[in-house]
Image (cartoon, rainbow, N blue to C red):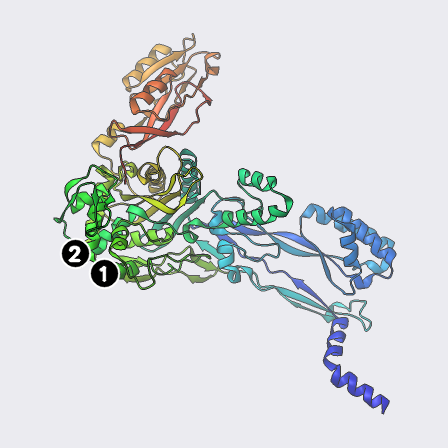
């Protein structure tokens, strides 16, 4: 009976437990890591890839005594520069497999193999105690480039942020395994024919809509704007193909190093963490890391301000609530209904009587409160929803936020409607804003924005392609065309003229919104400065939104903070995207020209030729022949600029110090540059005496050769929005 009872207990009661134990004793299971897919930009440049590294493991079952465990643990801890006790504890595990270390590079791998050979020589039973398996480490060739978009992976290769997280299942693939039979006591591997291998299935690759060149240009100027305007809480820019919804660039500054995402990029914030008591540091570090990784373009909400007047205009024209001939009187303030305090216009003296086009170009708040009343709260809410503000856009990125409106059902009081008409009182995301503006200018169609154009497998086969998705038509093509024309005029001669780009038909609108709940440490009201524009105005292809959160410099207006950044980005991006420039006669007269080649001839001959070409000439040195020149032959320089000729070796060593050319009018900057024999190239708005320089491409204090061209950016300072 005892034998029968034991059989029943072992087979029935403990059957499953003993089967698993027998299986584990008779088989060794070694995982094979799948290679994570590559992320490419729209032109095929690698933005994220997996490089081969090695995973170190031990098989503690092979140890026969503590002497062997101690010897191996000591050797590995020294090679890995890690705690001995930690390795020794792993060596005591009663298992055939235990992870020791990941992401081992080739140099360290070779040293581990040498140590394994030493172990085998000393202890023949430990031939298999140390194993190295091929693994992969995520690598980002451009470091902080598009960091908020691309995201990063964790130590186990899982996506933790951005596209790496959103498309983790697509990129990660399927791990494989090797099952190896062991002998009856579970110590020795059986011959090869008793091994079963399941190959890993590598992950698929992503091809993005992001263009690396466009993204770099956006990041460059967005970052410069942070510095120039002393922006407190970062900035963002989004460029969208208005016809398809494809995101060509999405920049969030300041970024972080994707190869080192757990390090605080902001040195001041790190110093703040270090100054805290140790028990408070971890919490503050987590807070700042979350801020650092947050994609401001999709996860933050903000009051859109006057950019939203484009939307109010679209709904009013579409509904017939106003016409192009409708007039509005601005006295400098307006009361939405009797008894309520007047709400001011940025022009407190008032705009007087104005037709609709003038009201939009003047960015007149009283006029738009009247337009909002003409639309009515019910229709306003209908169009608010139709333009996509009441729902997430569905962009393929994690962490997209929802809007914050006055009520869930769109109910608004008279004051709510009044302030909503010019973009105050409710919060939306930047991605919602650029998507809605694109709908206004593309013929009225609301598109779903997207970042991944194709998914491609490991062999280069296309798995899927993202097709443009029209959600709905919100306004008619006639309304779209009308607003494009007015917004182009606004960029040429209205409040948006700091966003004008010479040679291109650009339309746009400024925005300055008050952050009602956020006041900075000095008790001064904080603002959002934004600009949204598009090109070409007669057939819009691309829209660009630039916005800065809390500029603390000399100005907080979108017209002076964000519009110049928009212009700087577009003047480089539009030619790159092969949009043909068409310059006016006035623009051609102000354009740069090309320096001739004046070297290798006599000084007199060189001077005569350069002067005939329309340039001023300055000669350095006492030689008879021109050895070199600045600007060099073929280089761009201002028309009627200065060519400097160097005639001996000593003169070729001469340098001048670049002066500070910011905060000046055009004539002042020209005079200052001329004093140092430097050429001044003008960028940005320069059409009136109110233009002031705000940045220069070569930093003040830099030593350069005489004749060097310094590009200085100007904007008009008498524009408010």
**Above or below, comparing residue 284 to residue 610 in the picture:** below
Quadrant of the rendered image containing residue 349: top left
Secondary structure type for disc 1: helix
CA separation in Å, label 2 and label 1 = 10 Å
Residue farthest left in this picture: 325
The answer to whether any part of residue 639 appears in the image is no
Query: From the image, which quarter does the C terminus lie in?
Result: top left
Q: Nearer the viewer, residue 490 or 403?
A: 403
Q: Does the CB distance between marks 2 and 1 fall below 8 Å?
A: yes
The residue that disc 2 covers is 321
Q: Which mark is residue 379?
A: 1
Q: Residue at x 63, y 60 (%)?
A: 33
Please say whether residue 141 is visible from this viewpoint: yes
**Residue 636: image x %, image y %?**
35, 27
Q: Quadrant of residue 645?
A: top left
Q: Residue at x 38, y 17 (%)?
A: 677
Number of marks in the rendered image? 2
- Which residue: 44% across, 19% down? 657
Q: Quadrant of the N terminus?
A: bottom right
Residue lying furthest bottom: 1
The reply, left or right, for residue 92 in relation to residue 356 is: right
Seen from the viewer's position, the closer of residues 540 and 493 is 493
Residue 273's x, y, as percent?
58, 42
Please state the horizontal and vertical placement of residue 705, each as a whole percent of the image: 44, 19
Vertical placement of residue 576 versus 115, above or below? above
């Amino acid at each position: 009976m005892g034998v029968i009872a034991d059989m029943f207990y072992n087979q029935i009661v403990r059957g499953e437990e003993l089967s698993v134990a027998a299986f584990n004793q008779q088989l060794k299971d070694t995982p094979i890591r799948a290679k994570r897919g590559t992320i490419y930009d729209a032109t095929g440049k690698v933005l994220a890839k997996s490089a081969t590294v090695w995973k170190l493991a031990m098989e503690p079952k092979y140890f026969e005594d503590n002497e062997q465990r101690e010897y191996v643990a000591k050797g590995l801890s020294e090679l890995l520069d890690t705690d001995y006790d930690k390795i020794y504890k792993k060596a005591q595990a009663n298992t055939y497999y235990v992870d020791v270390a990941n992401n081992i590079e080739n140099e360290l791998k070779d040293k581990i193999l040498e140590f394994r050979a030493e172990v085998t020589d000393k202890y023949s039973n430990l031939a298999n105690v140390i194993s190295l398996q091929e693994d992969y480490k995520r690598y980002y060739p451009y470091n902080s480039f598009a960091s908020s978009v691309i995201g990063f992976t964790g130590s186990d290769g899982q996506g933790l942020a951005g596209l790496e997280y959103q498309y983790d299942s697509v990129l990660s693939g399927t791990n494989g395994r090797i099952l190896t039979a062991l002998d009856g006591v579970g110590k020795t591997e059986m011959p090869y024919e008793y091994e079963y291998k399941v190959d890993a299935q590598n992950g698929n690759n992503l091809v993005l809509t992001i263009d690396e060149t466009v993204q770099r240009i956006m990041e460059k100027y967005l970052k410069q704007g942070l510095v120039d305007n002393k922006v407190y809480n970062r900035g963002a820019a989004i460029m969208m193909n208005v016809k398809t919804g494809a995101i060509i660039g999405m920049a969030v500054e300041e970024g972080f190093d994707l190869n080192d995402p757990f390090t605080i990029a902001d040195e001041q914030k790190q110093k703040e963490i270090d100054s805290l008591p140790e028990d408070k540091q971890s919490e503050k570090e987590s807070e700042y890391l979350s801020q650092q990784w947050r994609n401001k373009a999709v996860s933050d909400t903000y009051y859109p301000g006057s950019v939203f007047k484009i939307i109010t205009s679209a709904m009013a024209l579409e509904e017939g609530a106003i016409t192009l001939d409708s007039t509005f009187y601005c006295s400098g303030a307006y009361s939405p209904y009797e008894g309520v305090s007047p709400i001011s216009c940025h022009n407190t003296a008032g705009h007087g009587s104005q037709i609709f086009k003038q009201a939009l170009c003047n960015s007149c708040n009283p006029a738009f409160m009247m337009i909002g009343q003409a639309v009515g709260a019910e229709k306003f809410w209908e169009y608010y929803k139709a333009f996509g503000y009441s729902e997430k856009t569905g962009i393929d990125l994690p962490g997209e936020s929802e809007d914050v409106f006055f009520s869930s059902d769109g109910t608004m009081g008279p004051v709510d409607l009044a302030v909503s008409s010019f973009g105050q009182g409710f919060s939306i995301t930047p991605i919602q804003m650029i998507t809605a503006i694109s709908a206004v200018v593309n013929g009225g169609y609301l598109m779903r924005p997207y970042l991944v154009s194709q998914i491609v497998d490991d062999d280069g086969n296309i798995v899927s392609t993202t097709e443009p998705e029209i959600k709905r038509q919100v306004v008619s093509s006639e309304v779209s065309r009308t607003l494009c024309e007015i917004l182009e005029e606004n960029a040429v001669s209205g409040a948006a003229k700091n966003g004008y780009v010479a040679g291109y038909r650009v339309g746009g609108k400024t925005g300055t919104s008050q952050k009602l709940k956020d006041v900075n440490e000095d008790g001064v009201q904080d603002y959002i400065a934004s600009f949204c524009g598009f090109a070409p105005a007669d057939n819009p292809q691309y829209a660009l939104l630039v916005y800065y959160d809390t500029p603390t410099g000399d100005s907080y207006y979108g017209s002076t903070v964000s519009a110049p950044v928009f212009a700087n980005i577009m003047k480089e991006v539009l030619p790159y995207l092969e949009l043909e420039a068409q310059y006016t006669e006035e623009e051609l007269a102000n354009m740069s020209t090309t320096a001739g080649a004046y070297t290798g001839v006599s000084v007199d001959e060189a001077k005569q030729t350069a002067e005939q070409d329309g340039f001023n000439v300055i000669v350095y040195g006492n030689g008879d022949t021109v050895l070199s020149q600045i600007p060099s032959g073929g280089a761009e320089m201002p028309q009627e600029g200065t060519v400097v000729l160097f005639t001996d070796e000593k003169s070729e060593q001469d340098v001048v110090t670049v002066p500070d050319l910011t905060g000046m009018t055009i004539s002042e900057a020209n005079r200052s540059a001329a004093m140092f024999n430097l050429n001044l190239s003008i960028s940005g708005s320069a059409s009136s005496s109110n233009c002031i320089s705000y940045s220069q491409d070569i930093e003040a204090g830099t030593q350069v050769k005489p004749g060097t061209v310094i590009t200085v950016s100007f904007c008009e300072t008498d524009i408010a929005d």
